Amino acid sequence: MADYFKMSDAELIKERDELRVQYQHYKNMALNLDMSRGKPCTEQLDLSMEMLKMNDYIGENGFDARNYGLLEGMPEARRFFAELLGVQAENVIVCGNSSLQMMYYLIDLGWRQGFVDSQRPWRHYNSIKFLCPVPGYDRHFRVTEYFGFQMISIPMTENGPDMDMVEEMVAKDDSIKGIWCVPVYSNPDGYIYSDETVRRLAEMKTAAPDFKIIWDDAYCVHHLTDEIIEIPNILTECKKAGNSERPLIFCSTSKITYPGAGVAAVAASKRNIQHIVTNMQPMIISFDKLNQLRHVRYLKNKQGVLEHMKKHRAILAPKFRTVLDHFESELTPCGNIAHWTNPKGGYFISLYVMPGTAKRTAFLCRDAGLQLTGAGSAFPYQLDPQDTHLRIAPTYPSLEDLKLASELLCVAVRLAVAEKLLQQKGLNAV
């Protein structure tokens, strides 16, 4: 392999043709590989099977978890998530299995009713907008798109969203109602918000009195190294800045125990918690408290979670290393055709290919039996303006399948780039 940008036309044509032969080899294998979503693998799911053996459903206060009641959650479950999120139990509601469902519900609540600091429901504005750090989580963007928000892309840096841009926009436009944030191991870059970014988000002046930070702390315990990442607590920082009602904080055990049967929690100011519970009462009497008890008794506390996550790390770290090693060995020698993130935790790697080749790369992979998240998915409206980003999810395939998938992916990247370079030279038909 050699630098594609230093190849002669003849050398580049030869490289493309050789890559086509390699690519056809993978197509002939009739593969069925999946790196499209951040799903735990079977080995990870097996880690929590002991939890399902629990058969005592009486809570610490004598409450029978099998019955109606306690919409805010079992007291021990509220304390468990409070410790995980660094807040008080009174600031927590323990919900069903999906934090995304609760994000949807609270965006809906703002749209229908508004919050305790709202002048009127969001639906009564002529236009409503939401800030979307990019690349970001496609399902976040899908929620605000569904409610008709104009989504504004904010570039991500290694320290979090571009705060100069955020501060300038929110200070002058009261139709901007919030920002999506994944503060620790951001989806998909794996970046960690700096202390300065957290404090600027908490302290910034906003034209909208009810501006909301949707703080999705999905990966706060999903470490891939020995380093335990801690950042300033957003609720504490907002309270210090006089903006207690600003943050809505979410987490779940979806990738700690079971994505389809975990437990989610919401944290916010005491006033917001009361407002949320009051508006949930027409919808639901209580969430699954049996599952809440199972999780608390199995995981016990934050330290118990961190010990459990070491088992996940033992499974996942080699998978991330496999993908990164393939990128290094098979893409780096080809010149500046791609670069990627090297996260310390979370579930994803961002792969940035040469502009104009991400969709082609994803198509080549899909056509050869490897499913990736669609190119552009990490941007509002699925529109990546430079067609350069691919979200890579190494967690679900077996290590053997992941090696094969990484090989195919690298061939697809190189072939897409070779085709693009020849197209730019007017030689694509050769």
Image: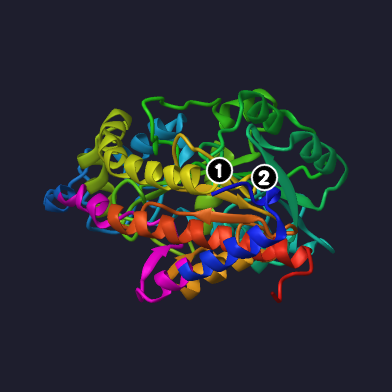
For the residue pair 263 and 25, the one nearer the viewer reads as 25
Q: Can residue 142 be seen at all in this image of the molecule?
A: no
x then y, percent, for residue 28: 38, 76
Residue at left offset 38%, top offset 45%: 322
| Span shown in magenta | 22-49
Residue 155 appears in the figure? yes
Checking the image for residue 212, the label placed there is: 2
Direction from residue 259 to residue 311 in the image, left or right: left
* Quadrant of image for the C terminus: bottom right
Q: Residue at x 78, y 64 (%)?
A: 425
Classify 344 as above or below 134: above
Q: What amino acid is at disc 1?
A: Thr
The answer to whether residue 46 is magenta is yes
3D distance between C-alphas at marks 2 and 1: 41 Å
Q: Is residue 18 left or right of residue 151?
A: left
Task: Give the secondary structure at mark 2.
Answer: strand
Residue 321, position in %: x, y? 39, 41
Report the residue marked by disc 1. Answer: 332
**SS under mark 1:** helix
Amino acid type, mark 2:
Lys
Q: Is residue 26 above or below residue 85?
A: below
Q: Position of residue 105 (x, y in %)?
A: 55, 59
Judge the density around disc 1: few (<14), some (14-19), many (≥20) Cα neighbours within 10 Å: some
Counting residues from the N terminus, which is met first, the one under dot 2 or under dot 1? 2
The residue depicted at 45 percent of the width and 73 percent of the height is 24
